[in-house]
Amino acid sequence: MASFKQEKDHIIICGYGVVGQKIGEVLGEHMIDFVVVDNNDSLTSKLEEQEIKVIRGDATSSKTLKEAGIVGAKAIAVVMDNDAKNLFSVLTARDLNKKIFIVTRANDDFVREKLIEAGADYIVMPQKAASREIISELKKNDTG
């Protein structure tokens, strides 16, 4: 397995689904160094072929986050589509790097509160954000 323990001032992306991929694209466009953590074997193999820094493993694991260079990272985006895994990853990241900026996602308010307690700095709730945007557009186009 690759190791990026010596990396400095990079961003770690935990979960490379739709959200993680978009984050990776934007970081790449801005020439910002990042390491992906995902446990999907075929996905991580493709990323390795594309010469994207990737760790195949569980983002809730201290060992995996250490391999991704959590100690020297400036930020981490915990964007898996699983609230429990996001919560455990945030707890682990905060434990390993007290100064890291942690961005994550949550699907409900209860988990949001737990993520704050766990040390997340910024939490996105995709369903709420999408709902607000849709309502805003509906209001703009209300002809009644």
Image: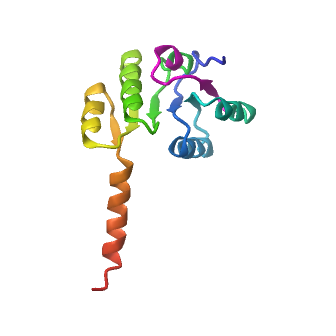
Residue at 65% over, 35% down: 43
Instruction: Looking at the picture, tell me which residue is in the foreground, 90 or 108.
Output: 108
With 5 as the anchor, is 113 left or right in this view?
left
With 69 as the anchor, is 98 left or right in this view?
left
Q: Which image quarter: residue 91? A: top left
Q: Which residues are magenta?
A: 52-65
User: Could you tell me residue 46's position as x and y percent?
Assistant: 71, 35
Residue at 59% over, 32% down: 33
Outermost residue to the bottom: 144
With 14 as the anchor, is 111 left or right in this view?
left
Residue at 60% over, 45% down: 25
The quarter in which the N terminus is drawn is top right
Outermost residue to the top: 63
Residue at 41% over, 25% down: 89
Number of marks:
0
Outermost residue to the right: 49
Q: Is residue 135 above or below residue 80?
A: below
With 52 as the anchor, is 60 left or right in this view?
left
User: Could you tell me residue 92's position as x and y percent?
Assistant: 40, 20
Instruction: Looking at the picture, tell me which residue is in the foreground, 49 or 5.
Output: 49
User: Could you tell me residue 38's position as x and y percent?
Assistant: 56, 30
Q: Is residue 143 above or below residue 17?
A: below
Q: Based on the picture, tell me whether residue 109 belongs to the magenta stretch.
A: no
Rendered image coloring scheme: rainbow
User: Could you tell me residue 74's position as x and y percent?
Assistant: 46, 27
The quarter in which the C terminus is drawn is bottom left
Instruction: Looking at the picture, tell me which residue is in the foreground, 17 or 67.
Output: 17
Q: Which image quarter: residue 10? A: top right
